[in-house]
Amino acid sequence: MNREKLIEFIDVQFNYNSRKNLFYNRENKSNIRPTKEFLIGCSELKEEIKVCLDDEYENDKYDALSSYFTKRAIKLFTENNQYLYFQRKSCEDLKRLYSSYIFDIHRLLKTKSITWQKIERLLYRHSNNLCNFLINTNGENVFTSKSNKYIDKIICEEYSSKLQVDILNINTNKILEPVLDIGCGSNFGLVKYLRYKGIESYGIDRNVQNNSFLYKLDWFDFRFRRDYWGTIVSHMAFSNHAYHHIKKKDLHKDKFFVKIKEILYSIKSGGSFIYAPGLPILENSIDKIDGFKVNIHSLGYAMDSRLYCTTITRE
């Protein structure tokens, strides 16, 4: 058994429990269930895995494994709920949680006999730690439904570049550069389209790979340089996230207002922040700030009061 094989075991466990609601029946037992491979690891492969974890502890005190666990967990959490936000410190806390979990597994493998009760206690403790982590980082309203065994995903679809250009009412002949797309998506379609048109464009998204024009991080962690961007655009990502956290009045509400101000002052004079759907609470407050002008562009739909595009121009 080596690290690569051990990671295969980890991936199987993650995939098997990827849609499980951690908060379901939380008081009684963990909704995280052991896979067949997990049980084999506790029996037939017990000694092999124990030796592998001995090496991992001796090499780096589980650092590489806990880092892998953490990345997989954050990816899984945000795939199931796009509105979750984790600061860098939160990721460090989660890594320590997983290091403790690996230690508990290692200790379990050292015992003479591994009973079903011991496995249940291990999973129950880990599951509760994850629940507390989610509550501490994102508030009481995160995954708190106890009636559903499985999670209903809150996802964000990616749209064609043409549709985004139409919705955001972008005039490629007049757009001020450089352009930044907040939440550009893993396919970064709008960024590619604008760059194809010869427009200096960049994108932020936690699901892209870093390169010369893409930033792999949550836009909440991005530092918006003052007076730098000609145009900032965001289809769905910015306003839906802001609306969600402001409406929920969760832990990140005040941080959103601070970040919004940072975004606005990162725009050059004459530049614009263009987003859809609308965000009435922001637009009403912007109207009272000198130096910014708000323009609303109807999308022609009447079923939702937020279905319009907003352009905030810095004068």
Image (tube, rainbow, N blue to C red):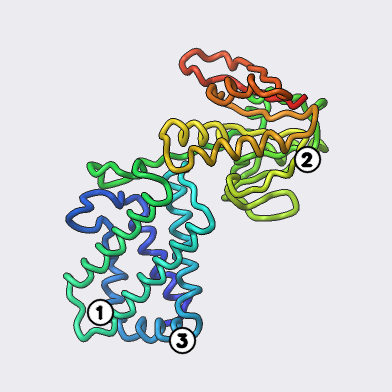
How far is disc 2 from disc 3 in space, using C-alphas? 48 Å
Residue 100, given in percent of the width and then of the height, sits at 37, 71
Under mark 3, the amino acid is Glu
Left-right relation of 92 to 142 = right
Quarter of the N terminus within the rendering: bottom left
* Dot 2 amino acid type: Tyr
Q: In this view, does 258 lie above or below 9?
A: above
Mark with earlier residue (2, 1): 1
Residue 19 percent across, percent down from the top left: 35, 50
Disc 2 + disc 1, Cβ < 8 Å: no
- For discs 1 and 3, the disc positioned in front in the rendered view: 3
| Pointer 1 or 3: first along the chain | 1
Residue under numbered circle 1? 43
**Is 304 on the left or on the right of 147, as rendered?**
right
- The answer to whether residue 193 of the structure is visible from this angle is no
- Residue at label 2? 228
Tag 3 or tag 2, which sits nearer the N-term? 3
- Left or right, residue 315 beside residue 58: right
Callout 1: 10 Å neighbours few (<14), some, many (20+)?
A: some
State the image coordinates of residue 242 (x, y, percent, origin top left).
Answer: 52, 34
Residue 259 location (% of width, % of height): 60, 40
Rate crowding at label 3 as few (under 14), some (14 to 19) or many (20 or more) other CA atoms within 10 Å. few
Along the line of sight, the residue nearer the viewer: 197 or 254: 254
Q: Which of marks 2 and 3 is in front?
A: 2
* Residue topped by disc 3: 58
The secondary element bearing badge 1 is classed as: loop
Residue at the (57%, 48%) spot, across then down: 218
Q: Which of 253 and 28 is in front in this view?
A: 253
